[in-house]
Image (cartoon, grey):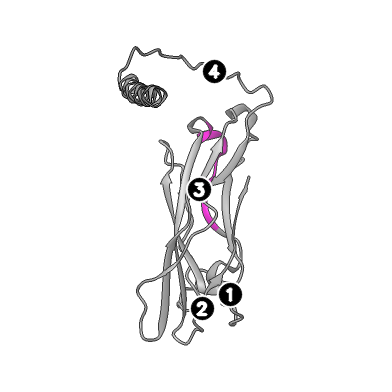
Amino acid sequence: MKRTRFAARCAAITTATALLLGVAGMAMAEENHGDQDVDVNVGITELVDGGVLAMSVAGTATTLTEDGSTPTVRQFKGTLPTVTVTDTRTASEIPAGAGWYVLGTSTDFAGGAGQPAISASHLGWAPRVIDGGESGLVAEGDQVDTVMDSSPIAVGLVDQELLALALDSGAIASEGQWTATADLFLRTPATVAPGGYTAKLTLSLFE
């Protein structure tokens, strides 16, 4: 009997101790005993090999959704991910008379289930400069219509078409960065085969 009572008392003490520790642990977790800041420093050295002209695109895909279709023409709209051109060169590093420009061209839309491809001539865009810098010397390209339109300018993104350009890189080099995008639209006959389609739109930066 004595052993049984002793074991029971030990169990009770152990349980009570565990409960007290649990409460104490909770209290410690909720009570702030002081803060300490840490300064994060970095040293950025000047580029010794000169600056560069580069392009980046904020995304690797975009989706077109149906909008504005008529009984005879299906229309699908979307937006090109933002294109950023960065120039870290000084004016003295840029050849006289140099200018940069961004071009875009698309492949045909391949059917995911074997349906006939949709020619890139059905894909058009309306370029837009988002941030052309304080000088305003960065310009957007003209709208490119599709084979479904009667535009004499261009027919789809079959060839390389202009998204944005700067005629004088040296004059705007101090601004450092510019952004542009484009409203995309795919126009097809109403008889187009249903299903998923994919095309690759390639953007290229030249100077």
Which stretch appears magenta?
162-173
Tell me: residue 94, above or below residue 198: above
Residue placed most toward the observer, 46 or 150:
46
In three-dimensional space, the C-alpha distance between marks 4 and 1, rounded to whole angstroms, equals 49 Å
Residue beneath the point at 33% across and 12% down: 33
Residue placed most toward the observer, 41 or 163:
41
The amino acid sitting under disc 2 is Gly
Name the element at disc 2.
loop
Disc nearest the viewer among 3 and 2: 2
| Among the 4 quarters of the image, the one containing residue 23 | top left
- According to the picture, the residue beneath numbered tag 4 turns out to be 42
Name the element at disc 1.
loop
* Labels 1 & 2 near each other (Cβ < 8 A): yes
Name the element at disc 4.
loop
User: Which numbered dot is residue 195?
Assistant: 2
Tell me: residue 165, above or below residue 170: below
- According to the picture, the residue beneath numbered tag 3 turns out to be 58
Residue 169 magenta: yes
The amino acid sitting under disc 4 is Val
- According to the picture, the residue beneath numbered tag 1 turns out to be 112
Q: Of marks 4 and 1, which one's residue comes earlier in the chain? A: 4
* Labels 3 & 2 near each other (Cβ < 8 A): no
Task: Farthest residue to the front: give it.
Answer: 1
In three-dimensional space, the C-alpha distance between marks 1 and 2, rounded to whole angstroms, equals 7 Å
The amino acid sitting under disc 3 is Ala
Residue 204, how many percent across, how many down?
61, 52
